[in-house]
Image: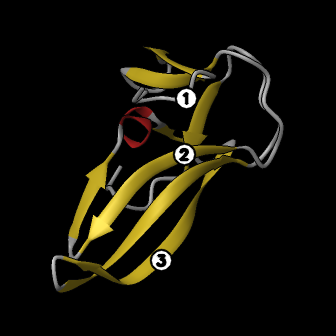
Amino acid sequence: MYRPLPKSLTISKSSIDGLGLFAKEDMEQGRNLGMSHLKIGNTIFRTPLGGFINHSNTPNCVKGELRMTDEDLKGESYKYKKWNVITSQDIKAGDELTVRYTFYKI
């Protein structure tokens, strides 16, 4: 069954801006929470994980970049990248997850 967010996360009101992602359980540093963004050509797509995570100058998560090249789909070659959100420190239940924005102007 498809889940737009990992079971360990929820969306709630943020003191940073609007809504944000919050931990429902304690998480250790280095936990891969899944894909936040996908870039095909010059177009960037956000998943719910990427759409609700807020910016911080002192983030508790990072975006890990994975490059994929020459993926063959129906006889055509595509180059794409994807980014996963990974905790960069231990996170307590109730904490808001944040990253440093690099795709958008803040």
Q: Does residue 4 sit above or below 12 in this rendering? A: below
Residue position for label 1 = 6
Residues under numbered marks 2 and 1 in contact, where contact means CB atoms less than 8 Å apart: yes
Residue position for label 3 = 67
- Residue type marked 3: Arg
User: Is 17 left, or right, of 76 in this rendering?
Assistant: right
Res 58 seen here? no
Q: Earlier in the sequence, mark 1 or mark 3?
A: 1
**What whole-number distance in Å separates the C-alpha atoms at marks 2 and 3?**
15 Å
Helix, strand or loop at label 2? It is strand
Res 27 seen here? yes
Residue position for label 2 = 34
**Front residue of this view, candidates 40 and 93:** 40
User: Is 3 left, or right, of 40 in this rendering?
Assistant: right
Spot occupied by residue 29 in the image (x, y as percentages of width and height): 82, 44
**What whole-number distance in Å separates the C-alpha atoms at marks 1 and 3?**
22 Å
Q: Does residue 29 sit above or below 94 in this rendering? A: below
- Residue type marked 2: Gly
Q: How is the image coloured?
A: secondary structure
Residue positioned 66% across, 15% down in the render: 24
- Residue type marked 1: Pro
Q: Residues within 10 Å of mark 1 (few under 14, many from 20)?
A: few
Spot occupied by residue 42 in the image (x, y as percentages of width and height): 20, 74
**Residue 7 in which image quadrant:** top right
**Residue 102 in which image quadrant:** bottom left
